[in-house]
Image: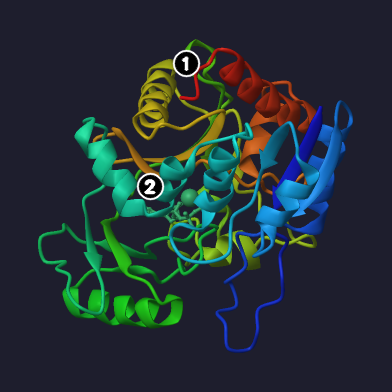
Amino acid sequence: MRVALTYNIRQEPLPSQPVDCYAEWDEPETIAAVYAAISSENDVALVEANERVFGGLSSVDPDFVYNIAEGLHSSSRESLVPALCDMMRIPYTGSGPFTLSACLDKSRAKQILSYFGIPTPGFSILSNLNGDVDALNPPVILKPLWEGSSMGIRNDSVGWDSDTIRKKAGELISTYNQPVIAEEYLRGREFTVALIGNGERLRVLPIVEVIFDALPADANPIYSYEAKWMWDNEENPLDIFSCPADITDEEKHAIEYVCIKAFKALGCRDWCRIDVRMDERGVPNILELNPLPGILPDPDSNSCFPKAARAGGMSYDDLILAVLEEAQIRYANGDVL
Ligand SMILES: Nc1ncnc2c1ncn2[C@@H]1O[C@H](COP(=O)(O)OP(=O)(O)OP(=O)(O)O)[C@@H](O)[C@H]1O
Ligand SMILES: [Mg+2]
């Protein structure tokens, strides 16, 4: 089969851009590793998801698109390749345009979760024009509304009083040029959960726990930009994950149940990594869904989806090919959702 691998490759930010503005894009090693895995069974062509992506897909004329592209601009950026594929009638891996947009805009995902009765922390949206945080129970965590990879989520992104919250929100709005989501801060244990498949075939890989004890002693217990990209590096890897998580069967079932519900509520396809945190009563809440999960190939780097796959007995190549297989089965069943 001829497969087009659609991707965005990481760049150095310009001096005028936030240091973390390309944090979501993939390193050349990741693109090469995904390419190698798919190539073991297919002819693969690389198509960069830039302004020329339509021409790239037209000239390759693939049987299938393997999509890992995070896209270029705005809250619709992850939807571009899937929307093009829908228009060009090319089957592709992963979620469709609506799901990718709704999950990138954390507030839309949370509204849908709430409709389905799935626990998620209370929130408010702050923009230059409006926003109210007084109804939220402090402390509150502030995050850019449509980013990932902890962009803009710093060790000091938690605020207790409305003056501090508004000041921090103002800084984020001007740095990232988008609204801010202010979310009630949950202090319980945190997990991240990798799911593969669809319908009856949907399965949960071994659960990963984020171990905040690994952070510097005075750090806030959040998986912040500092924790992901500064305190964790090749020379001093941070031992921040435990997989399979040390939890009771009851906790495991509760986490798996809420993640499967969330996956279906948002209409995810083929794979997704879901972040979960317990509230003070031990109820797992959904923080956010990542339908285009990070997939660093190096086992020494802290990349949760490949880590969960390894704990479940799948190599990196197995994982990449399993996603393609699930997508093919979904299309063969005439069932895009
Ligand atoms: N409501 C919350 N309560 C407690 N901690 C939170 C909350 N929201 C976010 N966090 C902390 O901040 C981290 C990053 O938040 P979130 O997962 O929403 O950001 P992201 O940039 O989309 O992450 P990813 O790298 O998974 O794409 C979480 O892993 C968690 O540690
Ligand atoms: Mg996250």
Residue behind mark 1: 199
Residue 328: percent from the left, percent from the top?
Answer: 65, 21
Q: Amino acid at mark 2?
A: Ala
Left or right: 237, with 279 as reference point:
right
Residue 42: percent from the left, percent from the top?
Answer: 85, 29
Residue 122: percent from the left, percent from the top?
Answer: 21, 50
The quadrant holding residue 165 is bottom left
**Distance between the alpha carbons at the discs numbered 2 and 1:** 20 Å
Q: Nearer the N terminus, badge 2 or badge 1?
A: 2
Left or right: 100, with 241 as reference point:
left
Q: Is mark 1 within 8 Å of ligand 1?
A: no
Residue behind mark 2: 102
Q: Amino acid at mark 1?
A: Gly
Left or right: 328, with 273 as reference point:
right
Give whichever of 160, 13 is nearer the camera: 13
Residue 324: percent from the left, percent from the top?
Answer: 69, 27
Q: Is mark 2 within 8 Å of ligand 1?
A: no
Give whichever of 7, 322 is nearer the camera: 7
Give whichever of 144, 78 is nearer the camera: 78
Q: Quadrant of the N terminus?
A: top right
Q: Dot 1, how many residues are within 10 Å of its Cα: few (below 14), some (14-19), or many (20+)?
A: few
Q: Dot 2, how many residues are within 10 Å of its Cα: few (below 14), some (14-19), or many (20+)?
A: many
User: What kind of element bears circle 2?
Assistant: helix
In the image, is residue 76 above or below residue 130?
Answer: above
